[in-house]
Amino acid sequence: MSLLTPSPNGALSPAGESVQPAHGTVLFTRYAFMPNHLERCGPLRAQDNRTIFQYAVAGDTDPYFTSLLQEFQAAYPYLKLIAQNTGHKDAFDPAVVEAYWIGSDLLDRVEVRQFHASIEQRFGKQVNQKQLEYLLGKAPAGARPHHSFNVFDVQRFTQEKTHSLHHMEKCRIGWGRVEAIELSHLVVEYQPLEWVNPSSNGRAGLGTGAPTLGRVLRHMDGKGFADRAVVGDWVAFHWDWVCDVISESQRAQLERWTLHHLHLANETL
């Protein structure tokens, strides 16, 4: 897989708003596939990664597919929490999945005390007491069960050996506008994660930099999740993999929740 690297190609053009709906398990896999392929989360059996990819490409689903996705022990508990707080019976309801990976107004309906209790239950035995108090303080400060919270705050303690600016840049859900389409990649304009100085607390903090061009992988063995992308579309990507074509409103939500959790992380860096 090619890493996100600068590219000289492409020109900006207007994006459309059409976004193809997907079953919740298919939508979840579009975002979870690549970190699972890289053996960073979810079921770590190679055959299972091929299976969930094949299901998602085909747009198909069945109980076995769902059972595999429940093995994503970082993401699945967040989905259950969002569903329980928003009246959704299925943790893989498309609206719930979108709230976790992209962000939506559903996150505003997650009750702070329940999120606080969930953090304590999940991470109380994984981190020391000082680290736990740090994480628990994020819920009343405004954190919500969005993927960016897990990347910027939780992984700081649960993945200390690998947690770095590079890791956060790859693990967060990025967004970019398609500038050019290549055989196996898209050239996108995006804003990379970087250290900015100073942050609101007077120290160097996390922020997004000036727009730049990069390449993200769109095909694996000739198959992918964003074949309908055209120049000017917004796409979301995860570990340099194109997850989906997203609308302008979805891009705005992704930016909103990413910057929100960057701000919260900067308060206690």
Image (cartoon, rainbow, N blue to C red):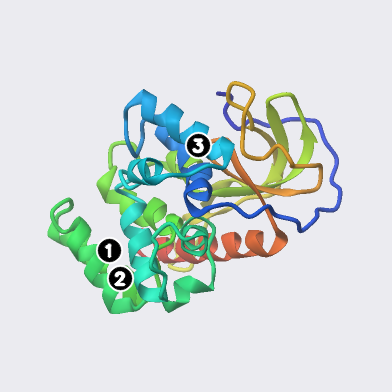
Circle count: 3
How would you rate the neighbour count of disc 1 (Cα within 10 Å): few for under 14, some for 14-19, many for 20 or more? many
Kindly indicate whether the residue at mark 3 contacts the one at mark 2 (C-beta within 8 angstroms).
no
Q: Amino acid at mark 2?
A: Phe
Of the residues under marks 1 and 3, which one precedes in the sequence?
3
Classify residue 161 as left or right of residue 219. left
- Assign the N terminus to one quadrant of the image: top right
Residue beneath label 1, please?
135
The residue at 34%/62% (across/down) is 80
Q: Is residue 264 left or right of residue 121?
A: right
- Front one among 25 and 14: 25
Q: Nearer the viewer, mark 1 or mark 3?
A: 3
Nearest to the observer: residue 209 or residue 176 = 176
* SS of the residue under disc 2: helix
Residue at the spot 37% in from the left edge and 44% down from the top edge: 69
Q: Residue furthest top?
A: 221
- Residue 174 in view in this figure: yes
- Give the foreground label among 2 and 3: 3
**Residue under label 3:** 55
Q: Secondary structure at mark 3?
A: helix
**Comes first in the chain, label 1 or label 2:** 2
Q: CA distance from mark 1 to mark 3?
A: 35 Å
Q: Is residue 23 left or right of residue 180?
A: left
Instruction: Determine which quarter of the picture holds residue 123.
Output: bottom left
Amino acid residing under circle 3: Tyr
Q: Is residue 166 visible?
A: no
On the image, the x and y values in percent for residue 14 come to 85, 53
* Residue that carries the numbered disc 2 in the rendered image: 115
Question: Can you give x and y, in whole percent of width and height, for residue 12 in the image?
Answer: 84, 46
Image x and y of residue 230, in percent: 79, 42
